[in-house]
Image (cartoon, helix red, strand yellow):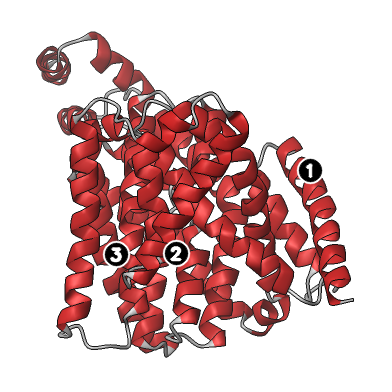
């Protein structure tokens, strides 16, 4: 009887998720938002059609592994090499500054140190799925700006492994030699694999050659490689998702990369659907209502603050203000890895149910408003491009006004800008000086 209930739940969520994904796709939004909304509607906060999350949670955990596995396979390390300096420095600055800010906010919101660090990590990470969807709609994927954004997203994805390790061991002393060695080993292993794979041509592994041409076996072989790597990483005390990510990195740089991605993606898409559905089932609407002021305040701080902080970081890295602003607006939302880090924190018992509900609420709302925030940012950028005068032009205009002391007819700002475009600044200033002498 219990299995019958589980199958009924799975049947309900699959049909509803398909409808939610189709609706959001028609609205030109990522289908993952539809999955989350579907989970909210099916869960305890709305129609309560799925009261037991157990059957869905098992599939959601598999979805997490495959999410990181496919992310690893799709990383283009050669493209990343072109922007890796800016992307890595940007990500490191994001992690450091955001964590310092959230730790400072903890004194006001009465958070524990673990919760403030977790929120700092979560705020750093952006949604690869949502950002890529928005860039595709804007035609930015192959531009210089688009490549930089992809580089930042890759750097953030690479940072997830040490973040998981930090959260897992947060309650223990970092003077523990075993934990310190694990941390160094996890970071060093990623660096070594990336360095090796990015310097060589596509690698060959026996597994890919054995199943070449057998589509039925290719997907199974890929998943087997993923789960073996995840199991070994878990047994080594790192984390199963970390192992899945490394497996994806390795397979993503083989000659059979495209075939492996093509055969694995359908399975991954189904399990990812369950992952985001489970997040929707977790979302507590009553919690948002009870802590409405706190949730909305934090959502505003995260969205606006993350954008402004990234603008400053990117401009410090020599990006023009306009480009830095648009890149920052695109990556202003919280990402799907926020759910993974929250799950790790709950399993490690380092945050309370309040912290879990707070992060899930902020992440879902942030993903929901990200398209609106981008539209607002583009509107602001359009106004700035239309009305803003550069500092050099402003100084020229100021000199002109200083010379026009006798009340002669003044040109409008627009006329002066056009005048300055057509003449050398010295000639313009001289002409105005001659007028005042007459």
Q: Horizontal placement of 14 versus 149: left or right?
A: right
The disc at residue 23 is: 1
- Give the mark toward the camera: 2 or 1: 1
Image quarter of residue 12:
bottom right
Image quarter of residue 84:
top left
Spatial CA span between label 2 and label 1? 28 Å
Residue 165 appears at what percent x and percent y?
32, 71
Residue 276 appears at what percent x and percent y?
64, 58
- Give the mark toward the camera: 3 or 1: 3
Q: Horizontal placement of 263 versus 28: left or right?
A: left
Q: Residue at position x 23%, y 45% from top?
A: 193
Image: 434 above or below 380: above
Image quarter of residue 48:
bottom right
Q: Earlier in the sequence, mark 3 or mark 1?
A: 1
The disc at residue 147 is: none
Whether tag 3 and tag 2 are in contact, CB under 8 A, the answer is no
* Location of mark 2 (residue): 302
Callout 2 secondary element? helix
* Location of mark 3 (residue): 162
């Amino acid at each position: 009887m219990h299995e019958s209930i589980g199958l009924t739940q799975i049947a309900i969520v699959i049909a509803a998720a398909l409808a939610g994904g189709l609706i959001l796709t028609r609205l030109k939004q990522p289908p993952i938002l539809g999955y989350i909304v579907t989970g909210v509607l099916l869960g305890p906060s709305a129609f309560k059609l799925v009261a037991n999350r157990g059957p869905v949670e098992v599939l959601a955990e598999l979805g997490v592994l495959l999410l990181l596995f496919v992310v690893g396979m799709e990383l283009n390390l050669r493209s990343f090499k072109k922007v890796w300096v800016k992307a890595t420095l940007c990500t490191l600055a994001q992690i450091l500054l955001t964590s310092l800010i959230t730790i400072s906010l903890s004194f006001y919101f009465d958070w524990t140190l673990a919760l403030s660090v977790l929120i700092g990590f979560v705020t750093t990470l952006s949604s690869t799925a949502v950002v890529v969807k928005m860039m595709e709609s804007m035609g930015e994927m192959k531009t210089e700006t688009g490549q930089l954004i992809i580089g930042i997203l890759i750097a953030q994805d690479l940072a997830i492994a040490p973040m998981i390790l930090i959260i897992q061991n947060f309650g223990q002393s970092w003077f523990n030699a075993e934990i310190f060695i694990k941390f160094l080993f996890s970071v060093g292993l990623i660096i070594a694999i990336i360095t090796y794979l990015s310097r060589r041509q596509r690698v060959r592994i026996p597994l890919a050659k054995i199943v070449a041409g057998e589509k039925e076996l290719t997907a199974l072989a890929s998943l087997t490689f993923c789960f073996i790597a995840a199991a070994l990483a878990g047994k080594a005390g790192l984390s199963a998702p970390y192992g899945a990510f490394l497996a994806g990195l390795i397979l993503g740089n083989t000659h059979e990369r495209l075939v492996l991605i093509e055969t694995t993606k359908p399975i991954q898409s189904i399990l990812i659907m369950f992952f985001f559905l489970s997040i929707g089932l977790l979302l507590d609407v009553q919690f948002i209502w009870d802590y409405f002021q706190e949730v909305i305040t934090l959502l505003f701080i995260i969205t606006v603050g993350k954008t402004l902080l990234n603008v400053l970081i990117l401009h410090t890295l020599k990006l023009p203000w306009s480009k830095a602003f648009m890149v920052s607006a695109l990556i202003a939302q919280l990402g799907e890895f926020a759910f993974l880090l929250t799950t790790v924190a709950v399993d490690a018992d380092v945050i309370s149910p309040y912290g879990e509900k707070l992060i899930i609420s902020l992440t879902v709302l942030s993903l929901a408003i990200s398209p609106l925030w981008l539209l607002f940012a583009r509107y602001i950028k359009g106004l700035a491009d239309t009305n803003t005068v550069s500092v050099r032009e402003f100084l020229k205009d100021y000199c002109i006004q200083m010379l026009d002391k006798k009340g002669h007819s003044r040109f409008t700002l627009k006329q002066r800008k056009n005048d300055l475009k057509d003449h050398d600044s010295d000639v313009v200033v001289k002409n105005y000086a001659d007028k005042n002498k007459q």
